[in-house]
Amino acid sequence: MPELPEVETARRIIEQTVVGARLTSIDIRLTKMLRLSPIQDPSVLIGASLLAARRRAKVLILPFSNDLNVLMHLKLSGQVSAHRQSERHTAGHPYPDPLGEYPHRTTHISLGFDNGWDLHISDLRQFGWFQIVPDDAVEPFLAEQAFGPEANDLSTMSVADFAARLAKRSVPIKTVLLDQKVIAGIGNIYADEALHKAKIHPATPANRIETSQIPILLDAIQWSINAGIEIGGAKIVNNKATMVNGFPEVHARVGEACPVCGDTIVKTRVGQRGTYYCPTCQPVPSPT
DNA sequence: TGCGTTGTTTCACC
DNA sequence: CGGTGAAACAACGC
């Protein structure tokens, strides 16, 4: 799915278009999207106003005025697109064409608001979910996820806290960065970018990261996530991120030149995920 | 044709 | 119990 920057971009679009507006219609074409929802009848939301657009980790939280909330996860291929006449804002996976007709074959949910904006939720692979839950279920749901601090603002995570988490894990550092319970919001693209910025090989066992590298890695994570937010989320074409304003620097750029040292970026597999790094900037860690 | 793709959950196995 | 590795969910383009 969209990672934190893409979900944050979707949140901002929702905030700027339909927060404060009243829901006038909701059309759910693929009921599987509601498979985790305790409330199955979407019409209960009609007539209520959207109060805010929140985000925790990669989950969107949309509280309505009738004590109900929409919780949404875009997973690997979800997209939010807001439309009002000729105006359009889109975030998330771009399949098949953000400039084309909506709703289309993979637009599974559409919401209409009384200020003229329509929100279309599309999802090629259908891994995403959409829940309608009462107010008193929101915090328990989030608590159950046990998300770590937000990757775009790690001011609440001390170097000592992070070091303590890393010390308990023998798996590759990249795998730990993808664990939402350690830090929330990092995905495959930004894990590669953060490790390149910090000059750490992605397969380095987490418990063997040098103490001096830990604060550098914390800074690098925030840098990569905020770089992603600045460009409005990664731009995916044919399942590959394309560079916008020099970002990403290594992800999906196998065979190209490292922007730091000029060496050729290579691709490997770490924790079953495609992984890109620069062999010069990120040397294989020395044994023991 | 088979493989890989911005994520998370579950399960078997230590 | 807790950590780890792999499969599963599914559709599409190369």
Image (tube, coloured by chain):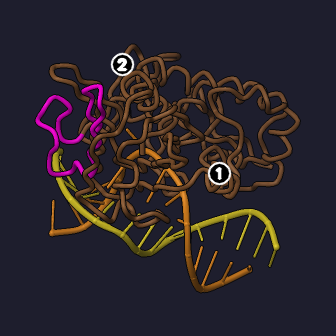
Chain colours: A brown, B orange, C yellow
Residue under the point 68% across and 58% down:
A144
- Snapshot quadrant of residue A218: top right
In the image, A227 versus A103, the foreground residue is A103
User: Crowding near pointer 1: few (<14 within 10 Å), some, many (20+)?
Assistant: few
Q: Marks 2 and 1, how far apart in space?
A: 33 Å
Please identify, in this view, whether the residue under mark 2 or under mark 1 is nearer the observer: 1
* Three-letter code for the amino acid on which mark 2 is drawn: Val
Q: Is residue A112 above or below residue A71?
A: above
Residue under the point 44% across and 37% down:
A266
In the image, A167 versus A116, the foreground residue is A116
x, y percentage for residue A173?
67, 45
* SS for callout 1: helix
* Three-letter code for the amino acid on which mark 1 is drawn: Leu
The residue where tag 2 is placed is A244
The residue where tag 1 is placed is A142
Residue under the point 48% across and 23% down:
A229
